[in-house]
Every structure is written in C-alpha cells, then in structure tokens.
Image: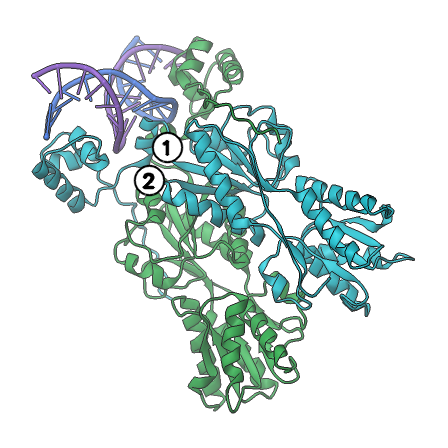
Chain colours: A green, B cyan, C purple, D blue
Amino acid sequence: MSAKSKVLPVPKLASISAVASAAGVSIATVSRVLNGTKAVNADTRARVEAAVEALGYRTNALARSLMRGETRLLLVLVPDFANPYFAEIIKGVESVTRQRGYGLVIAEASQTLSRHSAELDSLYNKLADGVISLARYADLKPLLGEIPDLPWVACSEHVGDSEVPSVSIDHRQAAIDAVQYLINRGHQRIALLSASEDYMWARQRHDGYEYALRRANLPVEPQLVRIARGTDYVHGMEAAGALLALEAPPTAVFAVADTLAIGAIKAFRRVGRRVPEDVAVMGFDDIPVAQVFEPALTTIAQPVRELGAAAAELLLKRLAGEPAESLILQHALIVRASA
Amino acid sequence: MSAKSKVLPVPKLASISAVASAAGVSIATVSRVLNGTKAVNADTRARVEAAVEALGYRTNALARSLMRGETRLLLVLVPDFANPYFAEIIKGVESVTRQRGYGLVIAEASQTLSRHSAELDSLYNKLADGVISLARYADLKPLLGEIPDLPWVACSEHVGDSEVPSVSIDHRQAAIDAVQYLINRGHQRIALLSASEDYMWARQRHDGYEYALRRANLPVEPQLVRIARGTDYVHGMEAAGALLALEAPPTAVFAVADTLAIGAIKAFRRVGRRVPEDVAVMGFDDIPVAQVFEPALTTIAQPVRELGAAAAELLLKRLAGEPAESLILQHALIVRASA
DNA sequence: CTGAAAGCGCTAACAC
DNA sequence: GTGTTAGCGCTTTCAG
C-alpha cells in the first residue's frame, strides 16, 4: 500500500578511480587486486580491499567487457517462453554456464529472424559472446547464410546441412519408435497430429511416421495427417476434430507434442470415444502434466536437461576455439495408459 | 550428421572509425547519421550509409552504453523458469519493453538473493538499468534494506511495507472470494492447500482463507491447512494425501495454485473419491491446462499479461524519473466443473 | 611490486 | 554542416 511517489535518483556508483584514491594507489593496482592478475603487496591489497568494501565498489561490466572484448554473456533464443519444454532446456543450459561464469540473456524469437531484428542486435552488437538457438528452423533459415562464422549452436532443432553445430535427439527415429509401438499393439490406421513444419523436428517426426508405416507395409493416407495450427491444447482439439469427421477414423493417433495429444484426447472424449479403448493416443516430450493427466500419456521423453547442458558445453567449446561436434542424444519411449 | 570440426574464428567487426575512413568523414559524423542527433548533409549521409552497409557495421552496444550511462536492458528475476505463470508475465513485460526499445535479461532467482549473488551482478555492474522482480519475498527480503533507491519493481509479490513499488492483484481478497464461493455452495469443512509461505502471495491467500471462514462463523482448523513442499503436481498429490488421512475429511479444498489443485484431484481419484461430488476443488492462476483437465478447474484468474505490462511501465517511469505508484489489478473467479 | 599511459568504441560538447 | 577532442571505466603493456 505504501505507494511511494518520490522521485528516486539512481545512485552514483563508485568508479575504480574513486577506490584508487581512497586507497592511495593507482587504478592499475586496484585492477590487479580485483582480478588477481599480478602479485600485489599484502598490505596494499588490504588497503584496496578495504576501500572497495567501504565504497561498495563493483566493477563496471560494460567497461570491462569493452576492454576485454568479451562479455561472458550468452544469448538464448526461444520460440516461446510459455512452453515448459524450453524452460527445462534453459535450466540445462544454465547449469553449465553458471559454473563457468557465464550469464544468460534470454530472448523470445517467435518470428522470422533477420539480421537486423532486435533479438540479434545484442549479438552483433557485441553484447553477447554467442548464441544458443531453440528457434524454429524456418525462422533461422534466412540468417544461416549471413552467419557463417558467428558462434551459434542450435539445440533441439537439428539443422543437418548447415554450418551450425547442434545438439538434438534423433526426431525421426523417435517417431519411428512411437509408430512402431502402435503397430506392435495391432493398430493399422494410425493418424499423425503434427505441428507447423516450420519446426524442423515436426518435419523429421512426420518423416519417421511415414517411414514406419511403409516399413510395415501400411498405406500412408494423406487424410490421416493433420497439421495443427499451433502447439497449444486447443490446437490439438481442433485438429482431432477433423480426424473424427473421417468416414474411416483412425484407431490410433501419434501426436508430435503432449499438448496436442491431450487436446486430442479431450476432443475424443467429448464425442464419447474412450482412450485408449476406442482410440490410442501417443504424445511426445513427456511434459509434467503427462503423468498426471488421465489417462496418463504414453509418450517419448527427451533428455531435456542434458540437451541444454550439451548445447552450452558445445558453445563454450567453440568460444574457446576448440573443435565442437554436433551431438545426438538418446530419447526414450515411456509407456503409460493412453496407448 | 555434418559435424563441423573446424575451428571458426570470431570475425572481426568493423568499428566506427573504419566506417568513417571508408566514407571519408570523421567518426562524429558517422555517429550523427547513426543516431540522428544532428542534421547531416544529404550526400554525406548517403556516403556514410553506404559505408555502413558495405562493412556490415553495427554499433558496439558496450561502448555506446558506457558513454550514455544506460544499457536499455532490464533484468527480470523469476523464481522458476518452468512455471507457465511466470512465462505469461514475462510476455506482458516484453510487450511494453519491446516497443520502448528495451531488451530483457532474464535470470532465475530461486535462492536467497544477496547483494553479491550472480543474479544481481548485472545490475550493480551497470549491465541492466533496472529490475522487475517476481522473486519470492523471502528471497528478496535480505536485500530490501540495501537497495533503498535502486530501480526495482516487484510484480505479483506485493511487498506492502517496503520501498519497492509493486504491481499485483489483491491476493487476500481473491482468496476470500474463492472461499466464500465454496461457502455459498454449502461447504462447511474447507481445507487449504497452500505453498511455501516464502511467497508473499501464499501468506496473503492463507490470510484471506482464514478471514473468510471466520467471517462466516466457521471454525479455522489447523489440520485442514496443508503447506505443500513445492508447487508441482506431485506436491499437490502429497499434501492432499495428508488430508485424506483425516478422520473428518474436508468436503472442499482451496488450493493456492492450479498445479496443486490438479495434483490433489489426482490423489482423491486414486482412492475413489469423485470431484466435485465427494470433494470440491478450487485452484488459482487459471493456467492453460485448467480448462482441458477433467474436471475442468474452477479457479481464480489473474490478469497475467497486464501484470507484466504494468510492472514494465512502472519501472520505465521510475527510470525516467517520474513518480511511480504501486498498482492493484483485478482478479476474476472462473467457475468450471471442479467446484 | 607499482604507476603512467595507451587505448577498447563510442557520444557529446566545443570549435570552426 | 563537420571535425577535433575529451572522456565513459576499465585492462594492460611498459617503465621503473
């Protein structure tokens, strides 16, 4: 309630020269005790430290970075803040960057990126040392030609043919595993609930879906493939509605995201179809609700934390000038109740 | 696939002086056309722009900020990346900062903050111009004395007695509304499923719960109050389990978060109790799953986007030296199926 | 072991 | 209208 309306001046921070004169030394010496770059006499150091403490001095990161030519800040580009999947990846990233002394700048890159987009300004403007991108392939694409040698790493979106190293699971193989599981359970008419193929993973999972069907000599029917307009629950409901309208509806659905799967289940239930008895539904990602929802979701789990951590390691390696190889991590099929 | 292992040098960026000599002008002139600070001759400007284009020049934000004394970067402190509630707030923040030309640095502040914690370095080190904090009150508290006049704004966590302006709903009143709704539906034994009271909102909602009961001459029974160990689904299940063990179990539960509510419903179902027939369950937040889950959640919706936007406006005002008042936004009771 | 001084890349007076 | 110059706050030779 105490709504303060006074105009508060931003306090003036002490600079290195203030510390220097307070301690009776030169700024070079202050810099030395701060960075431990060179030996400093014990009591000189003590005097400096006392002055730092007294003045509440903190190094100005701007000036330091300008001098050093690095900021120890990494840019993380996410397509959507609200998606818990990305949040987990970020946690993975942070677990490694934190202990290496790097900070994270997180920006939402929901639209097509151009070299002059606000998201990239900070990079090209030297505010960040490198980028970890979770952005959609389609958004990244126009940029790929322009950034032949800037320190980028793609995470989850595996961009096979580009110069950008990446860390990802094998989305295609994961989809094959999922569909094969359904086939093993006796399903013959399996629908695909996919997401915008602006996402590389959506394309790759789609690909795996078709491959698995063909391998089992099952027909690939175009009307059994639905591209949802987004990845929210509603989009899953929408797309599943279209499947329901079919004269010969599927007995199983493979959704490329748990959110879509849950939306689909909801839509099926509304018209009295039971899951998994009437239609089996598989998801992807293993988000937290997946095990709480009823029926609990059978799904593909990605090693999200590890994905993020690996991407961070990779970028840090590149930054250090070391060779950095792309990486494929393992996924896992989790059998629960929905399929 | 194409794992590149060549060592890629970070390209050298052109500086303002390179542009200046390429265009045959002084660096001051380049600065002028870049910033539009002063009138520049039409063809001088053209020459400069051509040089900028040719060299792919971009202003070094470090140097600029060092000069200007501001970075146009805001620090957002969140207690948990994975919580969609915070993600929505950030979107609100971003909607206003983006058009005002400010960038966001997002950091997870899950532990107690000290003046020397990494999360705050960027502020004290002048990397950010101000902070929007969604951090838990308890984590913030030790800091409050030290930052009497740094540009902070608290969001969602309403810190009544401090100097920090805030934007929030009236958590206590929202809880009163929720409990009163339950009372109106005839419930007499209403349990509270709360979260760690390190969160100010948890305290305030707890407070509202007790007030509403007393106001209705209902007893406040300590055993009907459970503090979950976290805010994930599992924590809701855990805490609800304890309620089940009671000799006289509640007929209704008010959970301070939708995730807890869903966890509780799951726990009730497991032992064959129907929701809402046997136990009514109310949530808080109206997260996306709330309407998809079955039964759909009756809950309190917060104007999340607006909360974030308002916090951003407030901070920007403070930064501009204008008076900035704390704000209380409106919540809404959403009746669905669970209570 | 310590200080003086040269920048890092930019903006903003201040001259002309 | 444009150039010169003085810093912003720091790190890092180079002397001593």
Q: Residue furthest right?
A: B247
Judged from the image, the secondary structure of the residue bearing numbered disc 1 is helix
Q: Is residue A186 above or below residue A75?
A: below
Mark 1 on the same chain as mark 2: yes
Instruction: Give the residue drawn at x 44%, y 76%.
Output: A206
User: Tag 2: residue type?
Assistant: Lys
Q: Position of residue A329 (x, y in %)?
A: 50, 63
- The residue singled out by tag 1 in the image is A65
Circle number at residue A54: none
Q: Position of residue A143 (x, y in %)?
A: 29, 56
Instruction: Give the residue drawn at x 55%, y 32%.
Output: B165
- The residue singled out by tag 2 in the image is A126
Q: Is residue C10 left or right of residue B94?
A: left
Say whether disc 1 or disc 2 marks the residue closer to the N-terminus.
1
Near mark 2 (Cα within 10 A), the count class, few <14, some 14-19 or many ≥20, is many
Q: Position of residue B222 (x, y in %)?
A: 85, 46
Q: Nearer the viewer, residue B135 or B92?
A: B92
Numbered label tally: 2
**Could you tell me which chain the residue with mark 1 belongs to?**
A
Judged from the image, the secondary structure of the residue bearing numbered disc 2 is loop
Which quarter of the figure has residue B173? Answer: top right
Q: Position of residue B144 (x, y in %)?
A: 60, 27
Q: Is residue B338 left or right of residue B219?
A: left
Instruction: Give the residue drawn at x 63%, y 34%.
Output: B159
Residue A89 appears in the figure: yes
Tell me how far mark 1 sits from mark 2, CA to CA. Answer: 9 Å
**Could you tell me which chain the residue with mark 2 belongs to?**
A
Residue A100 appears in the figure: no
